Amino acid sequence: MRFTLLRTSYNTFIITTLTANPPLSTNSFLFQHPPTWKNHPSAQINRLPAELQSWLQETGSLTKRLRGLYGAQFGVSVLFHQHKPATIDECRLLALPPAHYQLIREVLLHADGKPLVLARTILPAATIEVAHRNLSHLGSKPLGEVIFAYPDLERRQRQFSCAQTNVWSSSLQAQLAVNQATWGRRTVYAIHKQPLLVAEFFLPGITLAVE
């Protein structure tokens, strides 16, 4: 099921359903161009609002934190869930051969009518296998609820990006209208020594969350 987001006022949206237009890229609903990532942009991050810094630097589960804030109003909308080649940059980060198919999952995290986080996950076949396929049939279940339940979960690497408006696909823009630079992070995790990559971009509504 697809969704559209109808703007009613600044940072307030109504989530309804429809069949989305096909994405510009066949490997992503979110992006038409890959974002640029940096390993340690600490000077830039330190100048960001404290509320946004706290989300970018969160070390625990975003799902757990968002559920603590919004309870049952927190939800996940699946935008893209297909076996496709990851980008060359993503393959390099995960030490995967390019052009091989991986499970790519893109979602919107939202609560109380507000879009909060856009996320993209790359799940190699070996990681799905050692996780007993718990990662390949998530549906609208948050990824964080699954991976943070593994006691041997490792966080291997984290990078940051300030995505400009031109990286987003026309399909996403038609529904969400991302009209400002958007900060995000991506993290290489490992389950039983097998890696996966999770990228998360924080939309303006995230800084309105009251803790």
Image (tube, grey):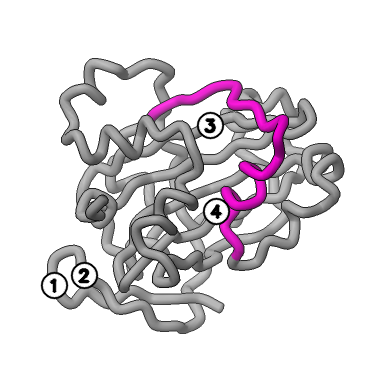
Q: Which residue is mark 1?
A: 9
Q: Is residue 31 magenta?
A: no
Q: Which mark is residue 12?
A: 2
Query: Mark 2 near mark 4, Cβ–Cβ under 8 Å?
Result: no
Q: Amino acid at mark 1?
A: Ser
Observer-side mark, 4 or 1, equals: 1
Residue closest to the eye, 199 or 172: 199
Q: Position of residue 139 (x, y in %)?
A: 65, 66
72, above or below 177, in the image: below
Q: Which mark is residue 187?
A: 3
Residue closest to the eye, 82 or 88: 82
Q: Amino acid at mark 4?
A: Ser
Query: Mark 3 near mark 1, Cβ–Cβ under 8 Å?
Result: no
Q: Amino acid at mark 3?
A: Thr
- Kindly tell me whether residue 31 is visible in this rendering: no
Q: Which residue is mark 4?
A: 28
The answer to whether 185 appears left or right of 176 in the picture is right
Q: Is residue 151 magenta?
A: yes
Q: Find the magenta span and give its range.
A: 141-160
Q: Position of residue 172 (x, y in %)?
A: 39, 62
The answer to whether 39 appears left or right of 143 in the picture is left
Q: Which mark is residue 68?
A: none
Report, in whole angstroms, how far the alpha carbon at label 4 lies from the one at label 1: 28 Å
Report, in whole angstroms, how far the alpha carbon at label 3 lies from the one at label 1: 33 Å
Q: Earlier in the sequence, mark 3 or mark 1?
A: 1
Residue at 18% from the left image edge and 31% from the top image edge: 48
